[in-house]
Amino acid sequence: MKSPGLKWIILFALALIWGSSFILIKKGLIGLNPIQLGSFRIIFCAVFLLAVGFKSLKHIASYQWKYIAITSLFGTFIPAYLFALAETQVSSSICSILNSLTPLNTLLLGAFVFGLQFKRRQFLGVVIGLLGTLVLIFGGNTSAGGGNYYYAFLVLIATLCYATNVNLIKKYLSDVKPLSITTGNFLVMLVPALALLVLTDIRVKIALPETHHALLYVMVLGIIGTGVANVIFYKLIQISSPVFASSVTYLIPIVAFMWGMLDQETLMPLQLVGAFIILIGVYLANKK
């Protein structure tokens, strides 16, 4: 018999792991460029998942591998590089808040692309969330220079990728075990990530002390923040419900903001208002 408190323990553990991912990206960029960071994140996670989930690949039918490849592209490959690139100009706190728009974008794509039904209240949540996004992005400088606004939109593109991935899995891979999907995704991404890494100056950087420190952060990000997090997230869904599991969306920015404050990041008052508006929108869009 499962302990009633177990789901809460897993929820907070997951929020801590995913909420810490943004500061890990920031630290990893001290020594690595965005392409190198994204590639190493994928490589470390792929090695971990292939070690624990290789046998699960047999549950993927041959005709399903094309969907595995597509979901790997939208679910991890593109976002891994977009988030790394965005955090060269945008604070980790703001990236985490913008990341919470994923459920809203999932609803929008599900309705307009995949033909899923949604309620009027959910549409209101989307509108409110988008309004909060504009307030957050334009409510103050996220770093030196004005070009950071464009980098903030890279995070929005990443959330659209996540939303596309969720809808694709729901429509084409709903009968495949989560571990099989995740392991298959990273198997597909491993070679392209290695190829991109080789095209950078990593052979020159690899001997530098700051690169070694960055690799430690990215190793934690890849193995714990991506691999282990996916496993315990699926566990959370199994012992609770998708609605309860999705509530981690509201906790991730809190953890990320705390890490940001410890690293001397600040948000303008208007940006805090924007963040609050976004979370209200996400709540309305997900309320049953």
Image (cartoon, grey):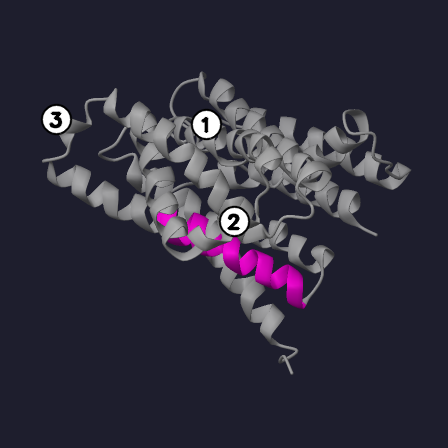
Q: Position of residue 56 (x, y in %)?
A: 50, 53
Q: Residue at x 24, y 43 (%)?
A: 215
- Mark linked to residue 153: none
As helix, strand or loop, the secondary structure at mark 2 comes to helix
User: Which amino acid, mark 2?
Assistant: Lys
Count of numbered badges drawn on the protein? 3
Label 2: few (<14), some (14–19) or many (≥20) C-alpha neighbours in 10 Å? few
Q: Is residue 143 above or below residue 8?
A: above
User: Which amino acid, mark 3?
Assistant: Val
Judge by depth and name the residue closer to the eye, 229 or 69: 69
Is residue 48 found left or right of 173 in the rendered image?
A: left
User: Which amino acid, mark 1?
Assistant: Leu
Q: Residue at x 63, y 79 (%)?
A: 2
Q: CA–CA distance between discs 1 and 2?
A: 31 Å
Label 1: few (<14), some (14–19) or many (≥20) C-alpha neighbours in 10 Å? many
Q: Give the residue at mark 3.
A: 204
Q: Residue at x 32, y 24 (%)?
A: 196
- N-term mark: 1 or 3: 1
Q: Quadrant of residue 211?
A: top left
Magenta highlight range = 221-239
As helix, strand or loop, the secondary structure at mark 3 comes to helix
Q: Position of residue 1 (x, y in %)?
A: 65, 83
Q: Give the residue at mark 1.
A: 82
Q: Residue at x 34, y 32 (%)?
A: 39
Q: CA–CA distance between discs 1 and 3?
A: 24 Å
Q: Is residue 255 above or below residue 150?
A: below
Q: Main secondary structure of the magenta part?
A: helix
Q: Give the residue at mark 2.
A: 58
- N-term mark: 1 or 2: 2
Q: Does residue 258 appear in the picture of this structure?
A: no
Q: Position of residue 184 (x, y in %)?
A: 49, 42
